[in-house]
Amino acid sequence: MRFMMMVKANKDSEAGVLPSKELFAAMGKFNEEMAKAGVLLAAEGLQPSSKGVRVRDSGGERTAVRGPFHDTKELVAGYWMIQTKSIEEAIDWAMRCPNPMGEGMDSEIEIRPIYEASDFPPDVFSPEEAAREQRLRDEMERKAAKP
């Protein structure tokens, strides 16, 4: 099962305050542990929403809205993509994570399962669609493997 673990933003992450050297080191060690265990697929920090854009579709009309976006409870400061045997194992990894906002700060990590092909009925996700998605994944892996 694949999961996304999202670190919720706070006023400091939205202000562009970077983690301390110690927190970078602790997060690096945590990411290494997950990589060695074979569960880490990706891990990234996100820049503040002031540098982001939201593309909205309203009745078929699309608009681009530049940040900042003000409700920090709804914003993500960083994420991990992991693959574990169960959500319980994903929770175990999140519980072992250093506080992503730094010691003494409030933080929240949200864990969400990622849809798999098997989650959809065949009339929605046909064998042809499954094959197309697999070809796309294979292509992405090939491109990522090139130096």
Image (cartoon, rainbow, N blue to C red):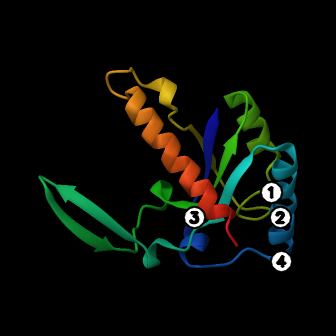
Is 88 located above or below residue 147 in the figure?
above
- Which residue: 61% across, 73% down? 12
- Choose between 52 and 108: the one closer to the eye: 52
Residue 32 lies, in percent from the top left, at: 85, 57
Q: Which residue is mark 2?
A: 28
Question: Which corner quadrant of the image does residue 30 belong to?
Answer: bottom right
Q: Earlier in the sequence, mark 4 or mark 3?
A: 3
Is 97 located above or below residue 147 in the figure?
above
Q: Which residue is mark 3?
A: 10
Location of the C terminus by quadrant is bottom right
Question: Which corner quadrant of the image does residue 96 belong to?
Answer: top right
Q: Which mark, by number, is residue 21?
A: 4
Question: CA separation, marks 4 and 3?
Answer: 19 Å
Question: CA separation, marks 1 and 3?
Answer: 22 Å
Q: Residues within 10 Å of mark 1 (few under 14, many from 20)?
A: some
Q: Secondary structure at mark 4?
A: helix
Q: Which mark, by number, is residue 108?
A: none
Amino acid found under the numbered disc labelled 3: Asn
Residue 101 lies, in percent from the top left, at: 70, 63
* Closer to the eye: label 4 or 2: 2
* Closer to the eye: label 4 or 3: 4
